[in-house]
Image (cartoon, grey):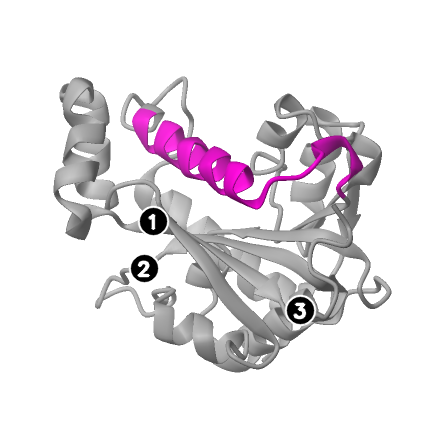
Amino acid sequence: MGDIRLETKAKYKKYYQKKGQHRNDILKDRGVLFQQLALEACLVNALRYIGFESDKIKLLDVGCGEGASLAPFLIYGFNSDLMFGIDILDERIEEARRRFPAINWICGDAAHMGFPDEEFDVVLESTMFYAISDQSLASLIASEMVRVTKPSGFILLVDWRYGVPWEKEFRAVTKRRIKRLFNVGDETLIEKTFNGALVPPIGRFLSKHLPATYFLIQKVMPILVGMKLVILRKSGDNKDASF
């Protein structure tokens, strides 16, 4: 698989050179706002569905980047002492520590995490598997996510279900791929799925030019929903024991 750090750094450098440095900057790109709102809405709906006392939950974000995907959990009342993020790029972890110093940030390989077995109540990933085209690497990371999740704990997958044929470095996170990666039916079960952001060309256009129509389009044209949040529950005998 080569040097994963160098490959990951090169991939994101190429991405931002192509798309622009402010591609995901909510203040500088008007196309981002409603995409982000749709993401947060599906996350809130997922957390409501799960139902638990948020301040007692031990949470891990795998492939946390600069920490943006964990930021909403602070607002939702999660205990920062019980929040962890891991990413392979040290410059991203440094930025996450600068922005959100109360959270526990770790620079490390998600395919070989140093956490004990069954350590976390909730394990999260956000648009990470879409950026991993190497199926062997994706399988290792998925296995690690299952390993560190408590029995009957939850894995939240927030990712893109459509790929782009001419961008081979990205790979759609389809239901079939999820079933294979997470050994659904044996090690995990699919609990629920929620709709998130629209496919980027349409979602960004609506966010910028026709924001009042964004969530109407999301509801009446589900085929245009590009991002899904899938809740997996790890198999276990004592359901909800951690909550």
Classify residue 115 by image quadrant: bottom right
Classify residue 66 by image quadrant: top right
- Please state the horizontal and vertical placement of residue 107, each as a whole percent of the image: 76, 52
Look at the numbered disc 2 and give the secondary structure of its residue.
loop
Give the amino acid at mark 1.
Met
Q: Quadrant of the N terminus?
A: bottom right
Q: Is 18 inside the magenta-drawn segment?
A: no
- Evaluate if marks 2 and 1 touch, with contact meaning CB atoms under 8 Å apart: yes
- Please state the horizontal and vertical placement of residue 2, each as a whole percent of the image: 61, 78
Sequence-wise first label, 2 or 1: 2
Look at the numbered disc 3 and give the secondary structure of its residue.
helix
Sequence-wise first label, 1 or 3: 3
**Residue 3 appears in the rendering:** no
Q: Which mark is residue 161?
A: 2
Q: Which residues are magenta?
A: 34-57
At a point 49% along the width and 42% down the height, the residue shown is: 46
Q: Is 49 inside the magenta-drawn segment?
A: yes
Above or below, comparing residue 179 to residue 56 in the picture? below
User: 123 or 84: which is nearer to us?
Assistant: 123
Give the amino acid at mark 2.
Arg
User: 130 or 182: which is nearer to us?
Assistant: 182
Give the amino acid at mark 3.
Val
- Evaluate if marks 1 and 3 touch, with contact meaning CB atoms under 8 Å apart: no
Above or below, comparing residue 93 to residue 228 in the picture? above
The residue that mark 1 highlights is 227
The residue that mark 3 highlights is 146
**Residue 140 appears in the rendering:** yes
User: 228 or 130: which is nearer to us?
Assistant: 228
